[in-house]
Image (cartoon, rainbow, N blue to C red):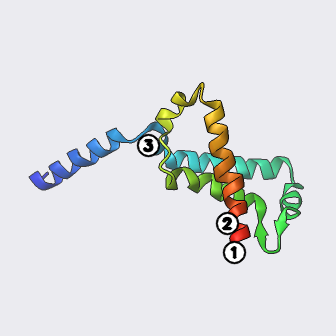
Amino acid sequence: MTTHTRSAAVATGAVFGRLSLLDRFLPLWIFLAMAAGVLLGAIFPGIQDAFDSLRIDTVSFPITIGLLWMMYPVLAKVKYEEMGRLRGQGRLFGVSILQNWIIGPVLMTALT
């Protein structure tokens, strides 16, 4: 192993060590979610029709909610390791959710 590849391996290990538990095992979580979806479809064969009934024109509402749920924390740079500090901040958290998920979208829709 050359000095360059050794230092690259050490740098990669340092970066991996700084990742949170969620980030380290992200591929595992994705595969588990996919397996859960396949299992859910096998156990409840009519679930596809139920999800299709929640379609708005050509957009699947459950898929939309899932994508927002998945992308929002990354875009907002949510630090999961600090979520414990929210205990006792229920009112502040509730006002934030109200402003960001209800008032903001309604206002933006009304302005367009």
Nearest the eye: 71 or 38: 71
Residue on which the image places disc 2: 108
Quickly name the residue at label 1. Answer: 112
Mark closer to the observer (3, 2): 2
Q: CA distance from mark 2 to mark 1?
A: 6 Å
Vertical side of 81 occupied by 63: above or below: below
Apparent side of residue 18 relative to residue 68 in the rendered image (left or right):
left
Considering the numbered disc 3 on the image, is that residue within a helix, a strand or a loop? Answer: helix
Q: Are marks 3 and 1 in contact (CB under 8 Å)?
A: no
- Residue type at numbered disc 1: Thr
Report the residue that reaches farthest toward the top: 88
Provide residue 72's location: percent of width, then percent of height: 57, 54
Mark whose residue sits in front, 3 or 1: 1
Q: Are marks 2 and 1 in contact (CB under 8 Å)?
A: yes
Label 1 CA crowd tier, 10 Å (few <14, some 14–19, many 20+): few
**Residue 29 pos. (x, y %):** 56, 45
Indicate the quadrant where residue 5 lies: bottom left
Could you say which disc has been placed on residue 95 in the image?
none
Other residues around mark 3 within 10 Å, as few (<14) / some (14–19) / many (≥20): few
What amino acid is found at the position of numbered circle 2 in the picture? Answer: Met
Sequence-wise, the earlier of marks 3 and 1 is 3
Q: Residue at x 51, y 50 (%)?
A: 27
Q: Which residue is mark 3?
A: 24
Give, as a three-letter code, the residue at label 3: Arg
